[in-house]
Image (cartoon, coloured by chain):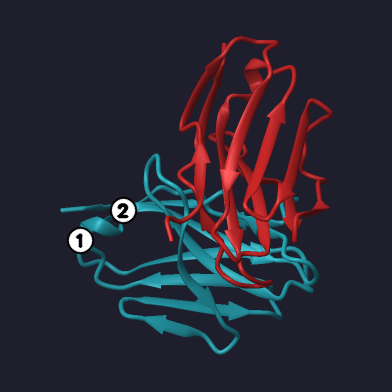
Chain colours: A red, B cyan
Amino acid sequence: DAGVIQSPRHEVTEMGQEVTLRCKPISGHDYLFWYRQTMMRGLELLIYFNNNVPIDDSGMPEDRFSAKMPNASFSTLKIQPSEPRDSAVYFCASSSDTGTEAFFGQGTRLTVV
Amino acid sequence: RKEVEQDPGPFNVPEGATVAFNCTYSNSASQSFFWYRQDCRKEPKLLMSVYSSGNEDGRFTAQLNRASQYISLLIRDSKLSDSATYLCVVNREYGNKLVFGAGTILRVKS
């Protein structure tokens, strides 16, 4: 298996633009997580899904952020409109079961100017 | 108070040294515990799970103290390649919400 695949790897966009980050989890994994990492706040859990259903979105910073998982092999994280403070590395991760190892993608480095 | 707290370091140690990291968590009902490692500009990767009885993997030993809500990681005979950020991770008592500490930076120098 190729592991968790994220795209794009890097994204530079202007303030106010819509940004869509994509993730393909490991096949057979039932859990998918979206994290954001910054120097100031570390690794923050934004939302996680179980069997394509959002379970906990309490970490989503505000209404500008939305996440979907239309099927077991694809998820998106959308920011609309984007702001400079959204600049961070966004990681997607998946795991097969509760309490098991989460495998991370390589991340998307987002810069909003 | 953060749910998972770690000393950010950095810990600067010479090769061959023994170094220990600590982590505390606030949710007493947490069920699963892990140490992840993150290299600079890379994704986090599992280093080891932490079991109630304590566990060892080569030079690495992890301990859990549920009464004190405390997790530790001991690295013996440090190598240059051990330089990284070590993340303490706690899983909630329900669901599968993995909460990460901010990480402890380790720098091993020759």
Q: Secondary structure at mark 2?
A: loop
> A105 or B29, which is in the foreground?
A105
Contact between labelled residues 2 and 1, with CB atoms less than 8 Å apart: no
Task: Check the image and report above or below for B29 versus A45.
Answer: below
Measured from the top left, where is residue A38 in percent x and y?
56, 34
Q: What amino acid type is highlighted by mark number 1?
A: Glu
Task: Out of A66 and B34, give the one closest to the viewer.
Answer: A66
The quarter holding residue A91 reads: top right
Comes first in the chain, label 1 or label 2:
1
Q: Chain of mark 1?
A: B
Q: Which mark is residue B15?
A: 1
Kind of residue sitting beneath label 2? Ser
Name the outermost residue toward the bottom.
B53
Nearer the camera: disc 1 or disc 2: 2
Residue A68 falls in image quadrant: top right
SS label for mark 1: loop
**Residue in view at x 74 percent, y 46 percent:** A70
Residue drawn where x is 50% and y is 66% of the image = B35
In the rendered image, residues at marks 1 and 2 fall on the same chain: yes
* Cα gap from disc 1 to disc 2, whole angstroms: 10 Å
Indicate left or right for A66 with B102 as reference: right
Vertical order, A6 against B15 (above or below)? above
* Residue, disc 2: B83
Q: Residues within 10 Å of mark 2 (few under 14, many from 20)?
A: many
Q: Residue furthest left?
A: B110
